[in-house]
Image: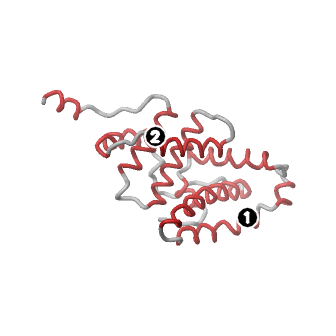
Amino acid sequence: MLTMFVLMLQTATLDADNYKAAITCAQALTISDATSKSPMQLTSQFTHLMMQAAKAKPEGTFFDQLNKLSESASAGATMTPEGAKPLVAPCDSRFPLARNTTPARLPSDSFRRDVLCFGTLSVLQGAAEELAKTGSDAELVKVRAALKPLTDKLTDEELNKRGLGSDDKFLTMLSNEMLGSLTAGNPLSVAAACGLKLG
């Protein structure tokens, strides 16, 4: 009995490695917030933490790695709510922007801002498409409406003028902007700064 009490008083700690810590926190926060946050909020937190893991241990292209990490973290060993709860505070301390709701600060350069907004909204569109399969498509409609003017701006002509005519060059810039946004906020807080409020 005394041993159990001592274990309960111990503070949960995260792995010193940001890659492992981000994956653990993605699972812990998703489980901990499952009944109190919307699916888009959970997706935003999870994506932010998968981006943190990709930044900590880059392998291949950013978007391929993000997809692989998301799939492996989702399929990993299931954490219990009891196991997740003590990890919330250390996760919030290590990754304070994962659950932050304040709109992010965007790059001052309008082109970089458009690229970041495009990338972030594209990621959220994928999440909204998945959510629409089993529920409402309201979020998907909002994301698509917000993406249209960005898609209209980022034409082949505009990208060619900036030396980003090849898919590889554009994806590299897009990846860099997305990774750079980790110090500004999570996908929903970036989207809010881009003018799109999702729940």
Kind of element beneath mark 1: helix
Q: Type of residue at label 1?
A: Thr
Residue 125, numbered circle:
none
Q: Find disc 2 in the rendering and name its residue.
A: 76
Under tag 2, what secondary structure?
Answer: loop
Amino acid type, callout 2: Gly
CA gap, disc 1 and disc 2: 35 Å
Q: Say which residue appears at 55% left-offset and 58% top-offset.
A: 127
Residue 110 vs residue 115, the one in the foreground: 115
Is 107 in front, or is 14?
14
Can residue 71 be seen here? The reply is yes
Q: Where is residue 64 shown, x and y percent of the image?
A: 65, 44
**Looking at the image, which is closer to me, 78 or 120?**
78
The residue positioned farthest toward the left in the image shown: 1
Q: Which residue is mark 1?
A: 151
Badge 1: residue crowd in 10 Å (few <14, some 14–19, many ≥20): few
Picture coordinates of residue 60 (x, y %)? 68, 37
Residue 192 in view in this figure: no
Q: Quadrant of residue 168?
A: top right
